[in-house]
Image (cartoon, helix red, strand yellow):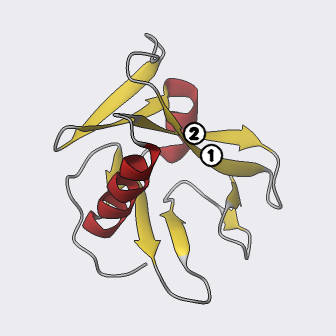
């Protein structure tokens, strides 16, 4: 993980670099979207991270909503059990670049960095 400044200490933390990249991706969509982060069964290590944009207001009572300077990050409570304390960073390196997940709950991670085991 880079030593980028974290925007706020929350259940799921975004570095400034990750937040800026997500905002740029959202701008390309041409809509005011939220980012949903969660986990799914599968991947090299048993569970894989998922991220997708969604329309505001689609969250339910089973979701936690984190506000980052007006940008909403949403995570369902079941996923949050596995992601609490996660730091989401972004790197534009040619090799190994992209979103990077630092998850204190992971006992093992895959070399791809997109899946983990607990």
Sequence-first disc among 2 and 1: 2
Q: CA distance from mark 2 to mark 1?
A: 5 Å
What is the secondary structure assignment of the residue under circle 1? strand
Residue 85 visible? The answer is: no
The image position of residue 44, as x and y in percent, is 83, 61
Which residue is label 2 attached to?
Answer: 38
Q: Is residue 6 above or below residue 76?
A: below
Identify the residue shown where x is 38% and y is 35%.
31
Identify the residue shown where x is 57% and y is 34%.
79
| Category of crowding for the residue at label 2, using alpha-carbon neighbours closer than 10 angstroms: few (below 14), some (14–19), many (at least 20) | some
Q: How many marks on residues? A: 2
The image position of residue 113, as x and y in percent, is 65, 69
Q: Is residue 65 above or below residue 107?
A: above
Identify the residue shown where x is 45% and y is 25%.
55
Q: Nearer the viewer, residue 25 or 44?
A: 25
What is the secondary structure assignment of the residue under circle 2? strand
The image position of residue 108, as x and y in percent, is 69, 65
Instruction: Give the left or right position of residue 69, taking residue 35 as reference.
Output: left
């Amino acid at each position: 993980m880079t030593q980028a400044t974290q925007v706020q200490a929350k259940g799921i933390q975004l570095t400034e670099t990750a937040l800026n990249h997500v905002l740029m991706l959202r701008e390309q969509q041409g809509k005011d979207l939220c980012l949903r982060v969660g986990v799914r069964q599968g991947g090299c290590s048993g569970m894989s991270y998922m991220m997708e944009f969604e329309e505001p207001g689609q969250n339910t009572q089973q979701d936690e909503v984190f506000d980052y300077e007006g940008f909403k990050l949403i995570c369902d409570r079941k996923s949050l059990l596995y992601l609490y304390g996660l730091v989401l960073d972004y790197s534009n390196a040619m090799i190994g670049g992209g979103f990077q997940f630092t998850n204190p709950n992971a006992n093992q991670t895959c070399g791809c960095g997109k899946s983990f085991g607990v």
